[in-house]
Amino acid sequence: MTGFKLEYETMKSEILPPISLNLNESHTTAIYSDTDMQAELIHMLLNDRDITVFDRSEGLYERLTVGDNITFYHKWFGCKTPLPEILVLFELQLCANKPLRKCSQSEIARVYYAKYFMMDTYPKVFHEPIHGVDIKTMNTFINMLKKIADDKTPALILVSNIEHALLLSDVAYRLQEKGLHEIEIDAEEKDETTPEDKPTSTLTTAKLFKIPAKIDDKVILFDPMEIDYIESQDGKAMIVINHESFTLDSTLAEVEKKLEVYGFYRCHRSYIVNLQKVREIITWSKNTYSLRIDNQIKSTIPLSRTKIQGIQDMFNLK
Amino acid sequence: MHTQRIGAIFEKDLKDFMKNMMLLMMPIAPILLSIMYSRLGDGEEIPISMLYIIVGVTFSAVTSSSMMTMMAEENEKKTLRGLMLSPASFMDIIIGKSLVVALITAVSLAISLFLMGIEPFLSAQAIIGLVLLFLFFLFLGIGIGLFAKSIASTSAYIMPVMFLFGFTPMIEFLALGEDSIAIKVADAFPIMQLINMHDTNSWVPIGVVALWTIGAALFTYICFKKERTDD
């Protein structure tokens, strides 16, 4: 299995650690990092090699229709796939006669995907590809990634949202000052090593149960029902409520044990979800799943393949 | 050069031209102007210099200006990013656009001259003159389009082109003395040379216009080199 090697020594940049990463031809790789780090990385990619980063920031021809745009790019890049197939692949057949300036953000995003798909670049690097698009569009993007992998072109996705990283990629990495580390996905439970909890509290205290999170010198007590979900970052559990997150002192496994009785479910190696707040179970085309949370920002969190059965049992779904 | 790409650009820009009100008004302007001029004449024959004013308006307002606007729009909206993977593909873009401009110019000029009386232009010499003049204005348009960063700035750039090269015959109306420097300089300008050609029937003016065209081509080449190194 060959691929494309990304290798950077750290010199020019102060915050970017040295990176050495092999992009596999038949895998999609994602790098998750904060936006500052991401900007540095993109800068590096653009400077050192002739890599094009697809970030949907260049213009399209707004006066022309979707169909005209696609026809032009199809001809210009000399794409082998027939034009109607491209339109269907990106679900653009229904808006083909609509001028681009009247299209929704998601439709325009699909035109960008089609353009990037037809471009003959190696490797393909995407920057925040599914930011602010609807579910149908995310699905076309996932389908496109599958096609790219079939064409033996390595794909790299740069995101600042870990849910997107886990959803889109086969191999996801977290980029921090310390370096590039793989985020394990869907691995079998390895948390067995966690020490047994102290004897669980009695029934009376369980009723008063609150989750303490420390911020500076304050301790905030959260009611389990407030919590949207809990994610794991660097071995520490983080409570997420809308867009705020609060670090806990315990590990995810410990929290899971305490919260099980309140209707929390370990839906992924690094996520515990509050089942009361789950609004949708989304099935993506490559047999992956996400849960949509009923909060203001409609977060989506990953649902492991191995955990789907548990959820279905829980909600009596078949 | 890549005919498939040139074809793609040509098709795309022609469609875009038809949907762009700003560009669409340009070829209509000389036609309206020639309707007006042909009414003014009261059936008398229209002087050659009048015909060349129309030619000048067409070439400056349609050829140079549309070329500039089209290229400036691509620059402004960054639509070319990712399309130009090699310098050769940039040539494809310019050629494709030039073909669109050539088509529109030809249509607009033909209609205008039919309205005004096309007879003086039905000689090989006059047609060669017009083709050279077209190339001259086209090169000016490409050159300026290369460094124009926004559509708004093109309206400033088009002014000198229009007044210096498009409206040169108008200088007669300024009532300057016969031997004033301005008139002598203006006489060397391409449109004035072509007017002289109709009087004298000599080939020298064609040569002078060809020199102007080569000059404009050089100007375009310099702009091109400069743009490439800037990136």
Image (spheres, coloured by chain):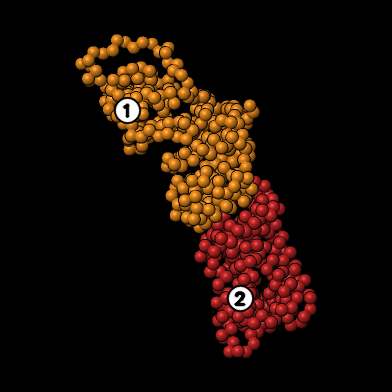
Chain colours: A orange, B red
In this figure, what is the number of numbered marks?
Answer: 2
The correct choice, above or below, for A313 with respect to B170 in the image is above
Q: Categorize mark 1 by other alpha carbons within 10 Å: few (<14), some (14-19), many (20+).
A: few
Q: Position of residue B177 (x, y in %)?
A: 66, 83
Residue extending farthest to the right is B203
Q: Nearer the viewer, residue A125 or A216?
A: A125
* Residue designated by label 1: A315
Tell me the element at label 2. Answer: helix
Residue occupying the point 45% across, 31% down: A288
Q: Position of residue A64 (x, y in %)?
A: 52, 57
Tell me the element at label 1. Answer: loop
Q: CA distance from mark 2 to mark 1?
A: 74 Å
Q: Amino acid at mark 1?
A: Phe
Image disc number at residue B111: 2
Q: Position of residue B209 (x, y in %)?
A: 73, 70
* Chain of the residue that carries numbered disc 2 in the rendered image: B
Q: In the drawing, does residue A240 fall left or right of residue A162?
A: left
The correct choice, above or below, for B6 with respect to B30 in the image is above
Residue occupying the point 72% across, 66% down: B213
Q: In the drawing, does residue B101 fall left or right of residue B123?
A: left
Circle nearer the viewer, 2 or 1: 1
Q: Position of residue B63 (x, y in %)?
A: 62, 66
Q: Amino acid at mark 2?
A: Ile
Q: Categorize mark 2 by other alpha carbons within 10 Å: few (<14), some (14-19), many (20+).
A: some
Q: In the drawing, does residue A216 fall left or right of residue B219?
A: left
Corner quadrant of residue B16: bottom right
Q: Nearer the viewer, residue A197 or A180?
A: A197
* Chain of the residue that carries numbered disc 1 in the rendered image: A
